Image (cartoon, helix red, strand yellow):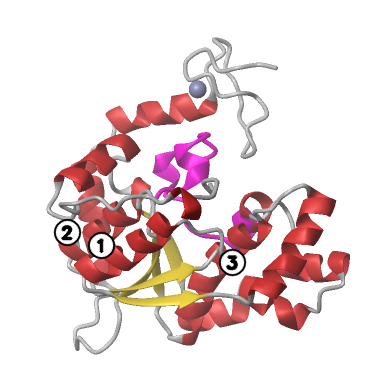
C-alpha cells in the first residue's frame, strides 16, 4: 500500500488519490493552492454571486444550507447568516444514528442562529430494511445517510423554489485534490452518484434490493428538469473561504456560540460516531 509521504493518506482512500514523483498525494498538492490564492478576491466573488439570490422582499429564504449539527455546521451557518447576511433555510436529514450530544448540538444550532430548520426523519423500519441490505450486499451501513443527506436538501430547494444551496467543503477538493479550487466546482448529479452514494442511486437500490422505489423517495435526487426549472445550483464555501477545519472549529468554540456549561454525555446514550465522507 502506498502512503502519501507528507500526510500519510493511503492509496485506497475512498475518494481516490494520485501521487506525484515525490510520493506526495493530490490532496496535499491542491492544499498548497490555499497559500497562493487571493482569498479576499474570492470572498468578493462570493458576495457578488449570492447577491443575485438575495430576496429583497424579506419574505422568502435566500438559500438552503444543509446541516448536520456537527463539525462544520456552525462555521457554515455563521458564514452564511452573520457574514453574508443571508436568510438561510437549514435542512437536515435525520440519519437516525444520533447521540444525545448530536441531537443537542443540532437543536442549539438552529436556536442560536435563529434560523428556520426543516428535517426529514424516514421511518426506522424503512432504514432497518435499507441498512440490512446495504450491509450485506455492499458492505456499508452509511448508504442511507450519504444518499439522504445529499438528496433531501435538493428536494427541498426544488419544492420551495429556492435556487441556491450553500454547502461547506467539497470533499473531493479538500480531502483528495480531485479538483482545483480554481475549477470552482459545483454540486452535480454525477459527482454525487460516483463518489457520495457509492455509485448506487435510489433507483439502483430499488432494483437490487426489491425495496419499492416509492419507499425510497427520500433518497432520490430530483430529476434534471425539476432542477433546471428552479435554476438550482449548489456552491461550496471552500472555493471562496480558505478552508481550515481545525481553525474554524476553534474559532466557533471561542465565539459567543459556545455553551457556558457543556452537557454531560451519558454513556447510556453514547453510540459510535458516524462519519459522512
Ligand atoms: Zn498527502
State the CA–CA distance, disc 3 to disc 1: 23 Å
What residue is disc 2 on?
83
Residue at the image point whose x is 41% and y is 78% from the top: 118
Horizontal and vertical percent position of residue 48: 23, 62
Taking the image as shown, residue 34 lies to the left or right of residue 1, namely left
What residue is disc 3 on?
148
Secondary element under disc 3, as helix, strand or loop, is helix
261 or 89: nearer the eye? 261
206 or 32: nearer the eye? 206
**Does ligand 1 reach within 8 Å of label 2's beta carbon?**
no
How many other residues sit within 10 Å of disc 3, few (<14), some (14-19) or many (≥20)? many
State the CA–CA distance, disc 3 to disc 2: 28 Å
Horizontal and vertical percent position of residue 8: 53, 19
Magenta-colored stretch includes residue 260: no
Residue at the image point whose x is 43% and y is 84% from the top: 161
Rendered position, 255 above or below 219: above
User: The N terminus appears in which quarter of the rendering?
Assistant: top right
Residue at the image point whose x is 81% and y is 71% from the top: 206
Secondary element under disc 2, as helix, strand or loop, is helix
How many other residues sit within 10 Å of disc 1, few (<14), some (14-19) or many (≥20)? many
Q: Report the span colored magenta.
A: 169-192
Q: Which mark is residue 80?
A: 1
The answer to whether any part of residue 244 appears in the image is no
Where is residue 211, by image quadrant?
bottom right
Q: Earlier in the sequence, mark 3 or mark 1?
A: 1
Question: Pointers 2 and 1 in contact (CB under 8 A)?
Answer: yes
Rendered position, 161 above or below 137: below
Amino acid at each position: 500500500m502506498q502512503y502519501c509521504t507528507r500526510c500519510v493518506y493511503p492509496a485506497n482512500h475512498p475518494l481516490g488519490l494520485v501521487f506525484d514523483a515525490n510520493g506526495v498525494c493530490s490532496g496535499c498538492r491542491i492544499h498548497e493552492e490555499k497559500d497562493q490564492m487571493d482569498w479576499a478576491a474570492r470572498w468578493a466573488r462570493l458576495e457578488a454571486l449570492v447577491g443575485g439570490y438575495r430576496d429583497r422582499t424579506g419574505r422568502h429564504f435566500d438559500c438552503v444550507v444543509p446541516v448536520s449539527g456537527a463539525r462544520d455546521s456552525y462555521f457554515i451557518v455563521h458564514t452564511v447568516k452573520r457574514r453574508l447576511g443571508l436568510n438561510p433555510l437549514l435542512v437536515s436529514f435525520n440519519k437516525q444514528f444520533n447521540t444525545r450530544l448530536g441531537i443537542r448540538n443540532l437543536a442549539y444550532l438552529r436556536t442560536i442562529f435563529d434560523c428556520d430548520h426543516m428535517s426529514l426523519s424516514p421511518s426506522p423500519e424503512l432504514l432497518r430494511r435499507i441498512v440490512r441490505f446495504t450491509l450485506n450486499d455492499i458492505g456499508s451501513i452509511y448508504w442511507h445517510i450519504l444518499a439522504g443527506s445529499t438528496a433531501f436538501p435538493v428536494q427541498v430547494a426544488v419544492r420551495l423554489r429556492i435556487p441556491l444551496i450553500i454547502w461547506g467543503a467539497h470533499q473531493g477538493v479538500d480531502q483528495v485534490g480531485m479538483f482545483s479550487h480554481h475549477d470552482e466546482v459545483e454540486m452535480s448529479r454525477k459527482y454525487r452518484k460516483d463518489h457520495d452514494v457509492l455509485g448506487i442511486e435510489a433507483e439502483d437500490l430499488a432494483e437490487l434490493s426489491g425495496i419499492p422505489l416509492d419507499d425510497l423517495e427520500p433518497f432520490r435526487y430530483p430529476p434534471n428538469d425539476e432542477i433546471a426549472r428552479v435554476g438550482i445550483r449548489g456552491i461550496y464555501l471552500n472555493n471562496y473561504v480558505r478552508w481550515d477545519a481545525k481553525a474554524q472549529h476553534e474559532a466557533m468554540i471561542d465565539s459567543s456560540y459556545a455553551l457556558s456549561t457543556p452537557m454531560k454525555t451519558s454513556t447510556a446514550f453514547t453510540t459510535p460516531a458516524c462519519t459522512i465522507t
